[in-house]
Amino acid sequence: MKRTLLALFLALALPIITSAQQSSVPAAGMMQMHAQMRTKILGLLTPEQKTLLAKVVGQLAIAPNPDLGAAASQLDAALSPTQKQTILSRHQAMMKQMQSMRDGMMAHSMGGMKTGGMKAGGMCGGKHGMNDPGVILIMMATHWGPMGPGK
């Protein structure tokens, strides 16, 4: 009886354990990709722009009612057109890669069923969404990663 229960437990548990191990590999890849992108994007900034970014992020952290849109506008005003375009294009490329990874994870977890893909949503709507260089800088500076804040 004990052997039968043990065999049944193993038969049920092994696919779950294997699936969990396999799904952590793409998540680690997304986190690594985000860390690399963060370094590249922050590397585009001049020392003065980095100081401004630190000031803006600090103000957001202690503000009783943080205004992400105003903070993003302040950063946008300090960026050159080339910097803005480079930030946007690098961020869009990273998001496409991450979307492919998420679709692959979803397809694997659904056993090959069509998933339709997950839609990437903006953190905030309107003018200052994730297609705004200032917002992207704030997210990168605060380690807002592919798995959420601090990830």
Image (tube, rainbow, N blue to C red):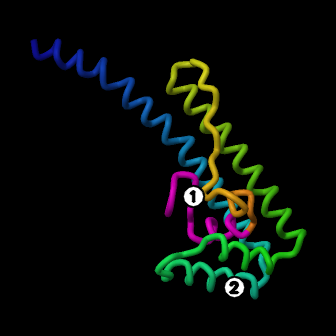
Distance from the alpha carbon under mark 2 to that under mark 1: 21 Å
Closest to the observer, 109 or 127? 127
In the image, is residue 142 above or below residue 94?
below
Residue for badge 1: 145
Q: Where residue 148 sits: x, y (%)?
A: 51, 56
| Residue in the picture at 49% in, 63% down | 150
Q: Is residue 47 left or right of residue 3?
A: right
Q: For residue 85, which quarter of the picture?
A: bottom right
Q: Residues within 10 Å of mark 2 (few under 14, many from 20)?
A: some
In the image, is residue 113 above or below residue 34?
above
- Which amino acid does the dot numbered 2 rest on? Leu
Q: Where residue 105 sits: x, y (%)?
A: 56, 33
Closest to the observer, 114 or 63? 63
Q: Which residues are magenta?
A: 134-151
Q: Residues within 10 Å of mark 1 (few under 14, many from 20)?
A: some
Q: Where residue 14 sits: x, y (%)?
A: 35, 25
| Numbered mark located on residue 52 in the image | 2
| Residue in the picture at 30% in, 17% down | 11
In the image, is residue 30 above or below residue 142?
above
- Which amino acid does the dot numbered 1 rest on? Gly
Farthest left residue in view: 1
